[in-house]
Each structure stands twice: as C-alpha cells, then as structure tokens.
Image (cartoon, rainbow, N blue to C red):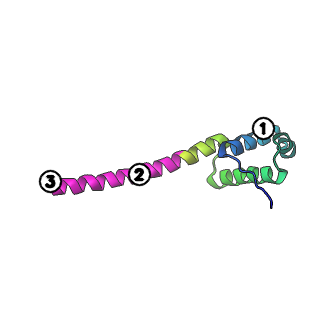
Amino acid sequence: MRKYRKYTPEFKVQAVELALESGNVSKTARDLDIGESTLFKWVNSYKDENAATGRSLSPADAARVKELEKDNARLKRENEFLKKAAAFFAKSLA
C-alpha cells in the first residue's frame, strides 16, 4: 500500500516561493525532499490562480487573501444570523 505524505498549506506556499525565487523547480523539489511533479503541480496551480484573478501576489499573500475571504464570508453569515435574532427578540418583546 502506498503512503501519501500530507503537506500543510504553509509548507506548500513556502515551497512555491522558493521554487519561484530560485527559478529551478526541480532543484527546489530535491532540496525539500518532495516529488518534482508535486512541486510543479503546486507552482502551476499558483500561476493559474494568479492569472485567472489578475493578481500578482506572492504565494504567501495569495494564501492570506484566501484565508481572509473565508473569514469575511463566515462573519457575514454570523452578522445576518444576529440581525435575524435581534429582530425576533425585538418582535417578541413588543
């Protein structure tokens, strides 16, 4: 049975940054002891995401923006719930 290694998003971001800075994905993959195809996939994914959005963010910044967008969506949902709850309780007190 083949065991797959799991990588944290932070590790992936740092690996992509190193590969882009060095300009040599193969050497970076060897240095980090990860598969070349894996790192090429991460780099291409990063490039595709930035090309699609028109962003020129570093991988770390792109990950942070994604995290902030998730937090923003969650806070909007919570805010809507609180508005409905306030309206409900205001209506029951009247």
Q: Looking at this rendering, what residue extends furthest in the bottom direction?
A: 1
Which of these two is toward me, 28 or 51? Answer: 28
Q: Please state the horizontal and vertical placement of residue 4, each as a whole percent of the image.
A: 76, 55
Give the residue at x 14% y 53%: 93
- Determine contact: label 2, label 1, CB under 8 Å: no
Amino acid type, mark 2? Lys
Q: Looking at this rendering, what residue extends furthest in the left direction?
A: 94
First of labels 1, 3 by sequence position: 1
Q: Please state the horizontal and vertical placement of residue 61, each as a whole percent of the image.
A: 62, 41
Eye-nearest disc, 1 or 3: 3
Q: Which residue is labeled 3 in the image?
A: 93
Range shown magenta: 68-94
Amino acid type, mark 3? Leu
Give the residue at x 80% y 61%: 1
Asked whether, in this view, residue 73 is left or right of residue 35, the answer is left
Distance in Å between CA atoms under marks 1 and 3: 62 Å
- Determine contact: label 2, label 3, CB under 8 Å: no
Eye-nearest disc, 2 or 3: 3
Give the residue at x 82% y 38%: 22
The 10 Å Cα crowd at callout 1, few under 14, some 14 to 19, many 20 or more, is few
Q: Quadrant of residue 87?
A: bottom left
| Residue 76: mark | 2
The 10 Å Cα crowd at callout 2, few under 14, some 14 to 19, many 20 or more, is few
Q: In the rendered image, is residue 56 in sight?
A: no
Is residue 50 highlighted in magenta?
no
Q: Which residue is labeled 1 in the image?
A: 21
Q: Please state the horizontal and vertical placement of residue 29, each as a whole percent of the image.
A: 83, 45
